[in-house]
């Protein structure tokens, strides 16, 4: 690393001397200097970002790898220091110079914090700030704007938040978005599954960090790492707080959030979770997530089988129609041969048919006429089969409107 730095320094000095000699020998033509090549600078900034992210990952381990993280931060600090020396003002935009200088100073401060016991939380906060500043500098060095582009792909900071285009600006849904100033909105769902917490959803634009706070009385299982989509580093700040630094818009173009972690003991609580979303400028917004209602359990397919089943029913009701008893017992045959249709044949031979649902619910009906020429009547059974019993409401209705209603309990003789 040192030899690479020294070699680059000598090349830079030689280039500077050559430029000075040319300036003496060749009179100025009065034309503006050509745009400098931004690609090497962006590569160096992205390498410094990678060093910083690596330090964060090392500090998220259990136990934290402090010394190795300091080495990664030292590499980052040296890269930033060289950028400031190799590209002195006014060769760089002021935003880039300020962001790089801030990030370098925070890297130096973090290295001191890591040498001090009990300062890990402070060190992480500074690393997060340095990372955001590096991303802001990198975003400001996008290719010069092209005519006719949308705000989210024109290379400019249109809304003045020090963030440029869809990779970093939370106001951009995608590169075709016409405005960098749209508010960041997130649609998140929370569903405890046994001892597992699951938070899923998407945001309208990119986001930098997610912080999740446990409900009152709950504690997260800090010994089992969380599973997170498109994160750069995640750690438990304590037994009740989970923090995750996320990837930029290139790493997470769909702005997806999917985090899963476990409860310390017992099932995950159904009480609300508090979630904070931070964008690349440092703005935070809070959401309170209620438990997503669990879908009803799927009913297992129900079948009486292919052979008729004897059913003894006890009817109890109110005698409304003349000649009908208020209570009686009746034997019938039930058949549902896997077709989804239940047929009930009573002791007189009358048959009523209707659908049987997968969970055993049924609704069977029939219309009949007396052989003696009397008025017609209808019958219906609406109920549910559970194991070897069934309960239903039986209705007997004549054409003239006479109605008898019975509560029926059946015993199935399989």
Image (cartoon, helix red, strand yellow):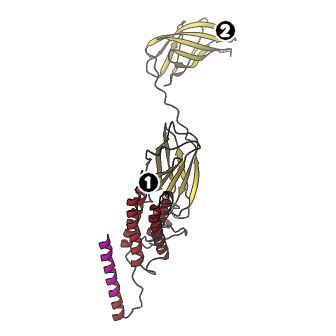
Tell me the crowding category of disc 2: few under 14, some 14 to 19, or many 20 or more residues within 10 angstroms, Cα based.
Answer: some
Query: Which disc is residue 140 wearing?
Result: none
Q: Residue at x 43, y 47 (%)?
A: 225
**SS assignment at label 2:** loop
Q: Earlier in the sequence, mark 2 or mark 1?
A: 1
Q: Residue at x 57, y 20 (%)?
A: 383
Q: Which residue appears farthest toward the front when viewing the image?
A: 117
Circle 1 residue = 60
**SS assignment at label 1:** helix
**Residue 209 seen in the current view:** yes
Q: Is residue 5 magenta?
A: yes
Query: 250 or 173, which lies in front?
Result: 250
Circle 2 residue = 326
Relative to 266, 12 lies left or right: left
User: In x, y percent, where is residue 87?
Assistant: 41, 78
Q: Residue at x 31, y 80 (%)?
A: 10
Q: Report the magenta residues as a range.
A: 1-17
User: In x, y percent, where is residue 31?
Assistant: 41, 88
Vertical placement of residue 352 versus 180, above or below: above
User: In x, y percent, where is residue 152?
Assistant: 49, 65
Tell me the crowding category of disc 1: few under 14, some 14 to 19, or many 20 or more residues within 10 angstroms, Cα based.
Answer: many
Q: Is residue 253 magenta?
A: no
């Amino acid at each position: 690393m040192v030899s690479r730095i020294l070699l680059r320094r000598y090349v830079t000095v030689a280039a500077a001397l050559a430029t000075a000699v040319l300036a003496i020998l060749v009179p100025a033509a009065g034309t503006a200097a050509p745009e400098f090549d931004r690609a090497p600078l962006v590569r160096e900034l992205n390498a410094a970002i990678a060093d910083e992210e690596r330090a964060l990952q090392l500090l998220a381990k259990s136990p934290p790898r402090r010394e190795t993280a300091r080495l990664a931060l030292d590499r980052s600090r040296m890269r930033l220091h060289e950028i400031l020396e190799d590209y002195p003002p006014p060769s760089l935009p002021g935003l880039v110079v300020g962001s790089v200088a801030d990030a370098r100073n925070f890297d130096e401060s973090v290295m001191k914090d890591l040498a001090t016991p009990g300062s890990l939380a402070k060190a992480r906060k500074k690393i997060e700030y340095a990372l955001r500043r590096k991303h802001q500098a990198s975003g400001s060095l996008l290719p010069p704007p092209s005519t006719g582009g949308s705000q989210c792909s024109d290379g400019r900071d249109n809304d003045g938040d020090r963030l440029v285009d869809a990779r970093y600006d939370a106001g951009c849904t995608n590169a075709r978005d016409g405005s960098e100033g749209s508010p960041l909105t997130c649609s998140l769902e929370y569903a405890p599954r046994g001892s597992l917490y699951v938070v899923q959803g998407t945001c309208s634009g990119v986001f930098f960090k997610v912080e999740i706070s446990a409900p009152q009385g709950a504690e997260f299982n800090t010994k089992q790492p969380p599973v997170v989509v498109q994160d750069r580093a995640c750690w438990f700040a304590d037994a009740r707080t989970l923090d995750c630094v996320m990837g930029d818009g290139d790493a997470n173009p769909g702005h997806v959030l999917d985090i899963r972690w476990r409860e310390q003991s017992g099932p995950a609580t159904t009480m609300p979770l508090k979630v904070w979303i931070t964008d690349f400028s440092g703005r935070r917004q809070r959401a309170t997530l209620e438990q997503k209602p669990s879908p009803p359990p799927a009913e297992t397919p129900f079948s009486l089988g292919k052979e008729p089943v004897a059913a003894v029913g006890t009817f109890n009701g109110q005698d409304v129609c003349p000649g009908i008893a208020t209570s009686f017992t009746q034997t019938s045959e039930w058949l549902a041969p896997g077709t989804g249709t239940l047929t009930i044949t009573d002791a007189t031979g009358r048959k009523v048919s209707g659908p049987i649902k997968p969970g055993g619910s049924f609704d069977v009906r029939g219309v009949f006429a007396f052989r003696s020429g009397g008025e017609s009547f209808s019958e219906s059974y609406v109920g549910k089969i559970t194991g070897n019993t069934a309960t239903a409401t039986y209705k007997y209705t004549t054409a003239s409107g006479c109605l008898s209603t019975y509560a029926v309990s059946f015993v199935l003789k399989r």
